[in-house]
Image (spheres, rainbow, N blue to C red):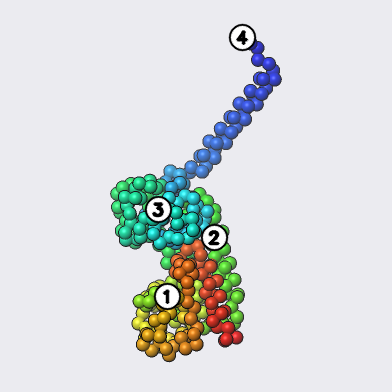
Amino acid sequence: MKKISPQLLRFLSSTLRGACISYICFIFYSTVFASPINVTDDRGAALHLAHPPERIISLLPSLTESVCAVGKCNLLVGVDRFSNWPKSVDTLPKLGGIGEVNIERIVQLQPDLVLIDQSSPAISRLHSLGIPTLALSINTMEDEHRTLKTLDAIFAATQGERVWQQIQAQITRANKQLLPTQKNIRVYFEVNAAPFAAGQSSFIGEILNRLELINIIPQSLGPFPKINPEFVVQANPELIFLSDSNTGQLQQRPGWNTISAIRERHLCAFTPNQNDILIRPGPRLGEAALIISHCVQEKMSSSQ
C-alpha cells in the first residue's frame, strides 16, 4: 500500500474540517430558518406551518401588493384577477375574485398558503382540500400595519415595519406640502357613482384627516356608506375627489350644479391607475396621500 505524504494528510484534514464546519453551519441555519410558523388570522383562526411558505397565492389586490412590498413577490404563484401591481404579477395565473375563485386551478398550483379576504366563501372549500389559508381584512390604516407584521411573521422577515414607516413618512410629507389656506376645507371623496363615499372611519377618511381636510361624510355613517345625493348638496363641499370616468355625470345629478366644488371646477378626477392606489388599503397608502395632496394644491391654489 502506497504511503500518504504528510502534505496530503494536512490537505485532507483541512478539507474535511472545513466540510464539517460547513455542514454544521448548514444544519444550524436550516434549523433557524425552518422554525415553525404560528400566527392567528383576522377570523381568530390559528395557522401552523412547519416552515415559511415558498409558494403563495394571493386573492386580494391589497394583499398581493403587501407581499411584494415586503420583498416576497417571487413567492407568488397566482393572484386574483384584479391584482395588477407591481407589473410583474401580470404574468401570474389569474384565479378569479372574492366570490368566484377558481378552486381547481388553485389545487393545480399546489400552494403552501393562500392569502384571502376573511369574507370569502372559498375559505371552507380550500380547508376541505387541505390547503392552508390566512384570512385577512384591511379596512383601516392600522389593519394594514397589522397585516405587514403578520407577513413578517409568516416569512420570518423584518421588512414590514420598514414599509409602514415609509407610509407614515409619505403621509407626513403630503401634509407639509399643503399651505394653511389649503387645509380645513370641506371635501367629498366618491368611491363610485352609486354613489358610495369614503367615510371618516375608512382608510381614505383617515388619510383625509391626516392631511387636515374636513370630510363631509360623518363617522356615524360607517366606512363606505351609500349616500343620498341630496346629502352632498346640503353639505356643499369645496373640493370633490372622484374617478375621472364619473365627472361627466355630475351636472346631471339634481341640485349638484349648486355645489361650490362643481361651480368652481374644484374636482380631483383620478385616472384608473391613481384610483387603484387610492381605493386599495395596502402599502401604497403613502402614495395615495401624496396624490390627494398634489391635487389639493393644484385645485385650491386660487384660495392662497
Residue that appears at 54% across and 40% down: 29
- Give the residue number, with chain letter if any, for mark 1: 245
Mark 4 / mark 1, whichever is N-terminal: 4
Q: Residue at x 48, y 67 (%)?
A: 273
Distance in Å between CA atoms under marks 3 and 4: 63 Å
Tell me if 99 is positioned left or right of 23 in this view: left
Question: Residue furthest toward the right?
Answer: 7
| Residue type of the residue flagged with mark 3 | Pro
In the displayed structure, 40 sits above or below 195; it is: above
Lower position in the chain sequence, tag 2 or tag 4: 4
**Quadrant into which the N terminus falls:** top right
In the picture of the structure, the residue carrying the numbered disc 4 is 1
Residue under circle 3? 93
What residue type is disc 2 on?
Answer: Val
Whole-angstrom CA distance, mark 3 to mark 2, is 26 Å
- Between tags 3 and 2, which lies in front? 3
SS type, badge 2: helix
